[in-house]
Image (tube, grey):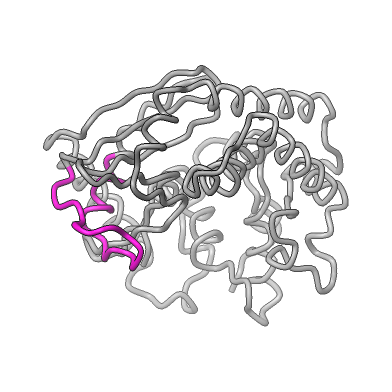
């Protein structure tokens, strides 16, 4: 079983939602119900879509330019963002998710699917306009963060959106940092972009998990040597792109222990919930539903959960 911060939050919010998303949904299954769950898992809120779009522009346009020492301007990044937003919005508006032969993977970076289209049939133009404004604001702030840009330019090697995995508490922990910067004369720095105007109380947990993952994973072939050995030496940089705030720190031993305890506790709950059964022997009825109605309202799987169960 795989464990991630997002999966553990989903499990806490609603065990059945976690089951649909991580166990039952299958992109290549010939079972129509499991294929439907996979497609439903692609639905996003407009705010989540907006944040992912910013991540994509930074990871796939800005970072490669910095890595290759090519000039990249704010206008370049905004132009890419506008084109990507337009293409993805058109895809979301067509809402062909369940059309015969449709493949999210085949659409590549032009793909987007929005929760409001599946469960409301329309996209509020006012929300789209806000998303456009916030995408450009996030990119503008990113380019104004001299401290962050200088660190990136000094790095020997930059790695964006790379999955790091290690074993713990009977599960495979998976973490995907927004950016890892390796240096010739110091320990790596992990960057985490946040695209919201409010704080996240458990941001330290996510960042500490990244530090553990970097020091415990099997290094990718392109990772510079030597590989960091102590998670307490990995610097973590949280960048709030809408509030233009940067927080730099190194995780303490106490934070790392709390993180390991959290992984162990939540992983144990997940394993116990499955009862040791194989995925094919589990059904939705094996898992508890959400305790709060607002969880259901924003859930991608509510029509399946309310109408039937996957056998």
Q: Pinpoint residue 86: horizontal percent, then vertical percent.
A: 81, 42
Question: Residue at image x 38%, y 47%?
Answer: 5
Verify whether residue 121 appears in magenta.
Answer: no
Say which quarter of the image contains residue 147: top left
- In-image side of 111 versus 147 (left or right): right
Q: Quadrant of the C terminus?
A: bottom right
Which residue is at the front of the view, 32 or 282?
32
Which residue is at the front of the view, 30 or 223?
223
Q: Pinpoint residue 225: horizontal percent, then vertical percent.
A: 22, 59
Verify whether residue 226 appears in magenta.
Answer: yes
Tell me if residue 264 comes above or below residue 271 in the rendering: above
Which residue is at the front of the view, 290 or 216?
216
Q: Pinpoint residue 30: horizontal percent, then vertical percent.
A: 67, 82
Q: Which residues are magenta?
A: 208-231
Tell me if residue 93 comes above or below residue 272 in the rendering: above
The count of marks equals: 0
Question: Residue at image x 25%, y 36%?
Answer: 235
Q: Pinpoint residue 144: horizontal percent, then vertical percent.
A: 53, 20
């Amino acid at each position: 079983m795989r464990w991630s911060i997002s999966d553990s939050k989903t499990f806490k919010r609603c065990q059945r939602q976690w089951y649909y998303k991580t166990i039952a949904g299958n992109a290549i299954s010939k079972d129509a119900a499991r294929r439907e769950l996979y497609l439903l898992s692609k639905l996003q809120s407009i705010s989540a879509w907006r944040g992912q779009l910013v991540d994509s522009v930074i990871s796939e346009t800005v970072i490669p330019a910095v890595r290759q020492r090519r000039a990249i301007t704010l206008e370049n990044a905004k132009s890419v963002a506008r084109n990507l937003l337009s293409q993805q919005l058109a895809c979301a508006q067509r809402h062909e998710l369940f059309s015969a032969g449709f493949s999210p993977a085949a659409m590549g970076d032009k793909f987007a699917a929005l929760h409001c289209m599946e469960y409301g049939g329309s996209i509020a133009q006012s929300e789209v306009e806000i998303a456009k404004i916030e995408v450009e604001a996030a990119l503008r702030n990113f380019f104004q963060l001299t401290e962050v840009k200088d660190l990136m330019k000094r790095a020997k090697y930059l790695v964006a959106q790379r999955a790091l995995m290690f074993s713990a508490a009977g599960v495979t922990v998976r973490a995907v940092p927004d950016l890892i910067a390796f240096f010739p004369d110091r320990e790596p720095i992990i960057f985490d972009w946040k695209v919201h105007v409010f704080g996240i109380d458990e941001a330290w947990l996510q960042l500490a998990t990244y530090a553990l993952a970097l020091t415990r994973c099997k290094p990718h072939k392109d990772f510079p040597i030597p590989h960091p050995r102590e998670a307490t030496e990995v610097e973590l940089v949280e960048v709030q792109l809408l509030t233009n705030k940067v927080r730099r720190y190194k995780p303490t031993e106490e934070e790392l222990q709390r993180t390991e305890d959290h992984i162990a506790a939540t992983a144990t709950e997940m394993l116990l919930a499955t009862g040791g059964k194989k995925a094919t022997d589990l059904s939705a009825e094996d898992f508890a539903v959400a305790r709060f109605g607002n969880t259901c309202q924003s859930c991608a799987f509510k029509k399946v959960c309310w109408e039937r169960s996957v056998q």
